[in-house]
Image: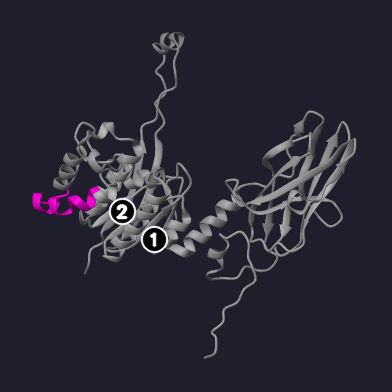
Amino acid sequence: MTQPAVTFDHVSKHYRGTRAYRSLRDDITGLLRPAPAPVAVEAITDVSLEISPGESLGIMGLNGAGKTTLLKLMCRIAYPSAGRITINGRIGALIEVGTGMHPELSGRENVRLYGRIMGLSRNEIARRFDEIVEFAGVGDAIDRQIKQYSSGMQLRLGFSIAAHLEPDIFVVDEAISVGDAGFQERCVERMTQLSHEGRTLIFVSHDLDAIETLCERGVVLKSGRLAGDGPAHEIVGAYFDEVSFARPAAMERSEIGGGGFSLIQVGVVDHVGTAILEVPADQPTRIRLRYRADRRIPGTSFTIGLSAGAGRCFVLASMLGTGEMHDVESGEGVIDCVFDDLPLNPRTYEIWGSVRGAAGYGDIIDWQRMSSFKVVRSEPERKGAVMVAMRVPVRFPHHWEVPSR
């Protein structure tokens, strides 16, 4: 029977907490009564997990969930407070920029040192050396000390060393996100190649698309505990849904703008103009901007964008593009942006916007996040791969055809 590549058997990791800052008065009074013991920080709690040889596993979770601690325990950078970890095979790891490299040694010397630690002979290291340097793209800098490298160069060399010395188990943390887009693409290609070669891949990332692409299995950590385990496409979809809906919608914020013009309310309203926080899926969406002006502003243009996060708008509605203008009168007023057909998937969306005046007025309100709202299911949830499709914010009607010959 084949042994698991990695086994976690009821593993816990607790770090000793720090004591609070004490003044001289506290030190003096502390002579009369002992200070309270520091509280332990529970990074990982009672995690049991088996990873089979050749399996590709993606680990997800919010910041502080214990993902990096789990990898450090796996690589024996740290040791468990309780439980047992069993590793079968050589581990190549990139957990942080510069992992496994000595800053005083040159890149060439670090390749040799890492290879020997991995148990490879000099001839085996020499055979892979040119490929490592070419992938890392460090050129003549290979003979410079690592401490003279930029963080990007350290990352490229560290990943290349770990990925090309034929590890049985390849462990990668979010560190590759430090690299440029081209290098990230090459990293994904290399990890895919290692997975196809039958090597065990363990990948931690906030990039759910990368996890779904690279991994056949996914696990979720929540507050140091295992909260989900299953096929990657199912776990990614469920996790994305949970994270998206954990972010609350907000109808309005404090006034936006100033200097004679401000938006006093931005949000979604229903067909009779009542403010709402949630919109049923597959329904028209009406976004209302209520403003206050100290004077008349002719030829004003409003722009609205919808974002699924990080400010990247997938829908943009702008008066500038259609040539429409709105003459703002002194006092309070309202203008609505109505999307008649906007097939949004259930999740939380951000409303971005800006206001621009006619010639001579310029930008009245700069482009910025103004509010948010939720789209909720209007019908019972369907099972299967629909969960994965929910990560794409907008659904466009389509169908598949097999042309007749």
Query: Taking 137 as reference, is 49 above or below it?
Result: below
Q: Nearer the viewer, residue 325 or 179?
A: 325
Disc 2 marks which residue? 9
Quarter occupied by residue 369: top right
Query: Taking 294 as reference, is 307 above or below it?
Result: below
Percent position (x, y) of residue 290?
82, 42
Q: Nearer the viewer, residue 267 or 59?
A: 267
Q: Secondary structure at mark 2?
A: strand
Q: Is residue 124 shown in magenta?
A: yes
Query: Taking 149 as reference, is 397 above or below it?
Result: below
Percent position (x, y) of residue 393?
61, 59
Taking the spot 55% from the left edge, 86% from the top edge, the residue there is: 403
Q: Would you say residue 310 is visible in this rendering? A: yes
Q: Secondary structure at mark 1?
A: helix
Residue type at mark 1 is Leu
**Outermost residue toward the bottom?**
405
Disc 1 marks which residue? 214
**Outermost residue toward the front?**
359
Residue type at mark 2 is Asp
Q: Residues within 10 Å of mark 1 (few under 14, many from 20)?
A: many
Assign the N terminus to one quadrant of the image. bottom left
Percent position (x, y) of residue 34?
39, 18
Taking the spot 68% from the left edge, 68% from the top edge, the residue there is: 379
Q: Earlier in the sequence, mark 2 or mark 1?
A: 2
Percent position (x, y) of residue 71?
33, 47
Does the magenta stretch mainly form a helix, a strand or a loop? helix
Highlighted magenta segment, given as a residue range: 118-133
Q: Is residue 174 shown in magenta?
A: no
Q: Residues within 10 Å of mark 2 (few under 14, many from 20)?
A: some
Report the mark closest to the observer, 2 or 1: 1
Quarter occupied by residue 383: bottom right
Q: CA distance from mark 2 to mark 1?
A: 26 Å
